[in-house]
Amino acid sequence: MPVRLRKFIGTILIIVLVVVYALVANTIAVATLGNAPWWGHLLYFLLTGLLWVLPAMVIIKWMAGPPQR
């Protein structure tokens, strides 16, 4: 697969990942954190704010292609 096509697909995948992840994370927060204390909100959004990076790293690694020989 050409590098330019791989990067284009990866960019679209990252955009979709961020939008879907934000919607799911906020939906879960609204459904479960209604009566939680402020530190519960802080921990939840800190964790979910950092957790999206893991699948994004996989996509970026795929975009980079196979290692050079």
Image (spheres, helix red, strand yellow):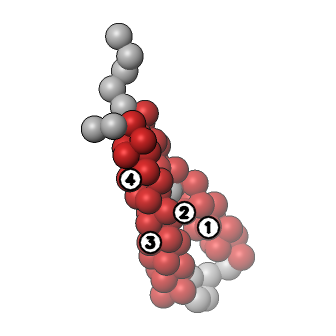
Q: Considering depth in this image, is 25 or 4 the residue closer to the camera?
A: 4
Work out which quarter of the rendered image holds the C terminus and state it. Answer: top left
Q: Name above or below for residue 43 compared with residue 54.
A: below
View extreme (right): residue: 38
Q: Is residue 49 visible?
A: yes
Q: Which residue is mark 3?
A: 20
Q: Which residue is mark 4?
A: 9
Are the residues tagged 2 and 1 within 8 Å (C-beta)? yes
Are the residues tagged 3 and 2 within 8 Å (C-beta)? no
> Which numbered dot is residue 45?
1
Residue shown at the point (37%, 44%) measured from the top left: 6
Residue shown at the point (47%, 53%) measured from the top left: 11
Q: Which residue is mark 2?
A: 48
Residue 43 placement, left or right of 9? right
Q: Considering depth in this image, is 55 or 33 the residue closer to the camera?
A: 55
Whichever of callouts 4 and 1 sits on the residue coming sooner in the sequence is 4
Q: Residues within 10 Å of mark 1 (few under 14, many from 20)?
A: some
Quarter of the figure with residue 60: top left
Amino acid type, callout 4: Ile
Q: CA distance from mark 1 to mark 3?
A: 15 Å
Are the residues tagged 3 and 4 within 8 Å (C-beta)? no
Q: Position of residue 13 (x, y in %)?
A: 41, 58
